[in-house]
Amino acid sequence: MQRKVYECLLREAAANATKITGPTALSFDPSHAAGEAGSIIGPVTLKTLDTVSVASQIPEGVTAVDKAGNPLDLSSLGNGSEIYLQVPETQAAGTAQFSAKTTSAGVPLGMVWDTPRTSTQALITAKSTTKEFTSTAHIDWAAKVVNPAPPVIGTSAKDQADGDKVIDSRGGTVADVVTYRNLVPGKQYRIEGELVDATTGKGTGITGESTFIPSAADGAVEVFFKIPSGYAEKTLVAFEKLFEITGTTPVATHEDITDEAQTVTVGAVPTAATTARDGSGDDVSDKVLPATGGTVKDVIAYTGLTPGKEYTAEGILVEKVDGKAGEVVGEPVRVTFTPTAARPRHGRGHPPGPRLRRGQDPRRLRDDLGQGGCRRRAQGHRLRTADGDRRGPQARAHTDDARADHSGSDADDARAHHACAHDDGPGADDAERFPGRR
């Protein structure tokens, strides 16, 4: 009897169109998918005997969509529904969870339940009923691998002393500000630089180096170069290379010999020359002062000073006896002036200068030929910066043409002798005039 019932049920089941293989009233198949941010990832596919609502835990910015990328309503999905995720390119790595649950999945009478992975006899539903089913799925994604922009550096060199682009002829320090972009914050880097001769294109051997850890991708760091003496009138260009701290191949370079921003100039060594004459007239060849007194006009022509920097010239008259400097006559005079960037008209300036007081012993202005002596008046000048800086090389000039030759008379025979010490910064050629009155 039992055998006949079984055969009857089997014939009924075979006649039914619906056949489910295994206990799959509710499931996701596949239940896992993975991909990379910046794309549509999936699917996970819902298998169900009923229409169900799918709960989800999806990070902000990520959207559940269908295959075409249209937003998907998870509240009502049927059998075969595919779930994808739209993940933005900038989204960090993450996971989305899905969960489906139903308590109304009807199991029809005569349903054949077969488990092909297990060697058991097929089961046939003898009674229609409902049962609670749950199933979960998840979709993972990795952060998008973006090729970072390559590091870039630029430089701007200047004199550390005053911020301009002219270095003292005696030497100085170049401060090169290296700007960078696209570095990895928290990673250690090294910058190596060398000053290159702009004329020859060859390195000078003057180098600088700095190591740093950027706190942001973009920023700046300074590299310093110490220039010794011996580079007067040279134009130098800072070449820089950026390395990872242990690397031997630069990740960025800036080596443009025509870039004005990374170029500095070393000033010329100063020179000076002077010419003294009688200042009572316009005859520049008149070297004789009247015995009763007069004015000495002395022109100091100089080169190599720093334009815009204030200087002080000091002038004195010194008695010259038998070719040697004797006593100082009169009071020293100081004149302050500022050279300009270009040569003044006619190459001369006209500041006031030292004066000799009237009433000094005239015998000190005469050649005492009867005694075989030779007393001559000499004028000296010292040039320094207004702040008193007298460092640097001496620039001297001598003039031996300021001689009066009046036979048989007590004429003054004046010869000018000048010594100029001054700050030897670079600059324009210029000249200053110093008149003095006896």
Image: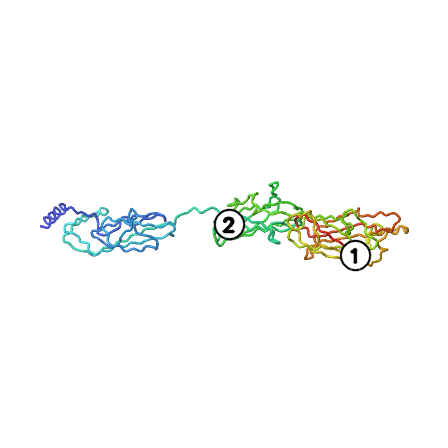
| Contact flag, marks 1 and 2 (Cβ < 8 Å) | no
Residues packed near mark 2 inside 10 Å, few (<14), some (14 to 19) or many (20 plus)? some
Q: Is residue 378 left or right of residue 209?
A: right
Q: Is residue 202 left or right of residue 415?
A: left
Q: Quadrant of residue 237?
A: top right
Amino acid carrying label 1: it is Leu
Q: Is residue 105 left or right of residue 382?
A: left
Colour scheme in use: rainbow
Residue 323: give x, y in percent of width and height.
83, 50
Q: Closest to the observer: 286 or 146?
A: 286
Name the outermost residue toward the right.
Answer: 370
Q: Is residue 344 left or right of residue 329?
A: left
Quarter occupied by the C terminus: bottom right
Sequence-wise, which precedes: disc 1 or disc 2?
2
Amino acid carrying label 2: it is Tyr
Distance of mark 1 from mark 2, alpha carbons? 63 Å
Residue 199: give x, y in percent of width and height.
61, 41
Task: Give the SS element for disc 2.
Answer: strand
Name the outermost residue toward the front.
Answer: 281
Task: Give the SS element for disc 1.
Answer: loop
- Name the residue beneath numbered marker 2: 180
- Name the residue beneath numbered marker 1: 356
* Residue 416 numbered tag: none
Q: Closest to the observer: 309 or 254?
A: 309
Residues packed near mark 1 inside 10 Å, few (<14), some (14 to 19) or many (20 plus)? many
Residue 187: give x, y in percent of width and height.
49, 51
Residue 110: give x, y in percent of width and height.
14, 50
Name the outermost residue toward the left.
Answer: 1
Q: Closest to the observer: 197 or 329?
A: 329
Q: Closest to the observer: 412 or 170?
A: 412
